[in-house]
């Protein structure tokens, strides 16, 4: 059984890219009792260390940040004009409730003069926070403030739906593994910043830690919904072992290591090729003189929407696979 309260509190924390401190504080409260050391680095990455005995270092990484809408201008009637922080789809951002870090809530809509919502673009989007003048709006929200979707935690049998499953569900999986793992290597659990705007936190953390192996955990797309693009990954068929995404080609030795770890413990897994979208896996791979880097993903439908949906059986498989990997004596090597 997974720790639902922990998952829900990590999901609920406000944390668009560049503003991850609240998420970091929540995660810290869960990992601190199990860690030998916990610290934030200069960029804000949260790093929890659990010592092993082999003298080798394994980095686990999952990003804390979520996508958001940043205020670029406020008009004379008090409407906020916004731009995207990360990969925000304007069409799924119409008619949403959003919230700012200071607790201000608003709703989104779009300029309806020219076309319907299906053609809405980011410059046509606006946020209504109930203000009637610029001054009234400015009393609540400043230029540069970032709004995130307000979403529910929906339980549907073994499946859950929420905003920010990308990548908080993987942060929760790393926490869950960190609490129970029997690691032979030093484990550096890194909760990274600014992944959604170009994998900015993970590379710096990897440079400082210099791990023998990195395993990133993220969500990945699926090919199991009506008339979607072809992809072999399915919800409920296990955690994935990544082969490739647009940031990385995982070295075959790392894939084989993860697949073997899964098979030895009868953990369900599926291979993953993600057509578009990158992960911290790639940023870590390119740090220093190159670092062996792989990725375990949790299959997720409707990524970057307020109703991201995953299967908790896949989540549990990801937790078990992390535990299996950090308990293996022999790490992959060139
Ligand atoms: Zn992600």
Image (spheres, grey):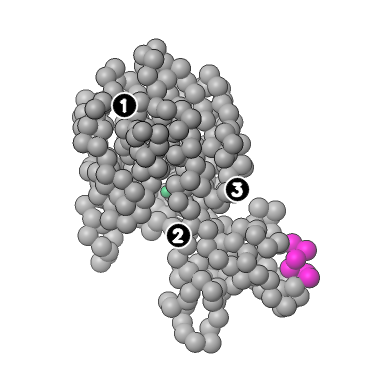
Secondary element type, mark 2? loop
* Of the image marks 1 and 3, the number of the one nearer the N terminus: 3
To which residue does mark 2 refer? 87
To which residue does mark 1 refer? 325
Could you give the CA–CA distance between mark 1 and mark 3, rounded to whole angstroms? 31 Å
Could you give the CA–CA distance between mark 2 and mark 1, rounded to whole angstroms? 31 Å
Relative side of 33 to 103, left or right: left
Q: Is residue 323 above or below residue 149?
A: above
To which residue does mark 3 refer? 19
Q: How many marks?
A: 3
Relative side of 42 to 207, left or right: right
Q: Is residue 31 above or below residue 225?
A: above
Res. 214 image quadrant: top left
Q: Is residue 137 magenta?
A: yes
x and y, in percent, of residue 5 in the image:
53, 38
Mark 3, Cα crowd under 10 Å, few <14 / some 14-19 / many 20+, is some
* Of the image marks 3 and 2, the number of the one nearer the N terminus: 3
Give the residue displayed 25% in from the left and 66% down from the top.
227
Secondary element type, mark 1? helix
Q: Which-is-in-front pick, marks 1 and 3?
A: 3
Toward the bottom, the furthest residue is 113
Mark 1, Cα crowd under 10 Å, few <14 / some 14-19 / many 20+, is many
Q: Which residues are magenta?
A: 135-140
Relative side of 113 to 273, left or right: right
Secondary element type, mark 3? loop
Res. 259 image quadrant: top left
- Camera-nearest residue between 45 and 33: 45
Does the numbered disc 1 mark a residue whose Cβ is under 8 Å from ligand 1? no
Q: Is residue 319 visible?
A: no
Give the residue displayed 35% in from the left and 54% down from the top.
277
Does the numbered disc 3 mark a residue whose Cβ is under 8 Å from ligand 1? no
């Amino acid at each position: 059984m997974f720790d639902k309260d922990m998952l829900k509190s990590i999901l609920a924390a406000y944390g668009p890219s560049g503003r991850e401190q609240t998420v970091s504080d929540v995660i810290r409260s869960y990992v601190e009792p199990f860690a030998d050391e916990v610290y934030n680095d200069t960029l804000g990455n949260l790093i929890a260390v659990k010592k092993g005995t082999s003298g080798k270092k394994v980095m686990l990484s999952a990003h804390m940040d979520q996508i958001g809408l940043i205020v670029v201008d406020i008009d004379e009637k008090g409407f906020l004009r916004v731009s995207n922080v990360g990969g925000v789809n304007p069409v799924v951002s119409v008619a949403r409730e959003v919230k700012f870090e200071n607790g201000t809530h608003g709703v989104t809509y779009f300029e309806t003069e020219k076309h319907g919502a299906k053609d809405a673009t980011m410059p046509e989007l606006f946020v209504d926070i109930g203000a009637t003048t610029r001054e009234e709006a400015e009393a609540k929200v400043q230029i540069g403030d970032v709004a995130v979707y307000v979403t529910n935690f929906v339980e549907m049998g073994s499946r859950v739906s929420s905003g920010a499953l990308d990548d908080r569900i993987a942060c929760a999986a790393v926490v869950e593994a960190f609490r129970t793992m029997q690691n032979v290597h030093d484990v550096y659990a890194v909760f990274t910043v600014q992944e959604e705007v170009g994998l900015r936190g993970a590379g710096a953390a990897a440079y400082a830690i210099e791990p023998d192996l990195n395993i990133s955990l993220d969500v990945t797309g699926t090919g199991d919904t009506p008339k979607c693009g072809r992809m072999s990954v399915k919800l409920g068929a296990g955690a994935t072992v990544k082969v490739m995404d647009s940031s990385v080609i995982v070295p075959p030795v790392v894939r084989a290591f993860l697949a073997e770890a899964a098979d030895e413990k009868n953990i369900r897994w599926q291979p993953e090729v993600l057509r578009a979208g990158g992960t911290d896996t790639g940023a870590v791979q390119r740090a220093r003189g190159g670092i062996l880097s792989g990725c375990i993903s949790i299959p997720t439908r409707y990524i970057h929407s307020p109703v991201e949906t995953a299967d908790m059986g896949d989540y549990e498989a990801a937790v078990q696979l992390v535990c299996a990997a950090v308990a293996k004596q022999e790490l992959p090597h060139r």
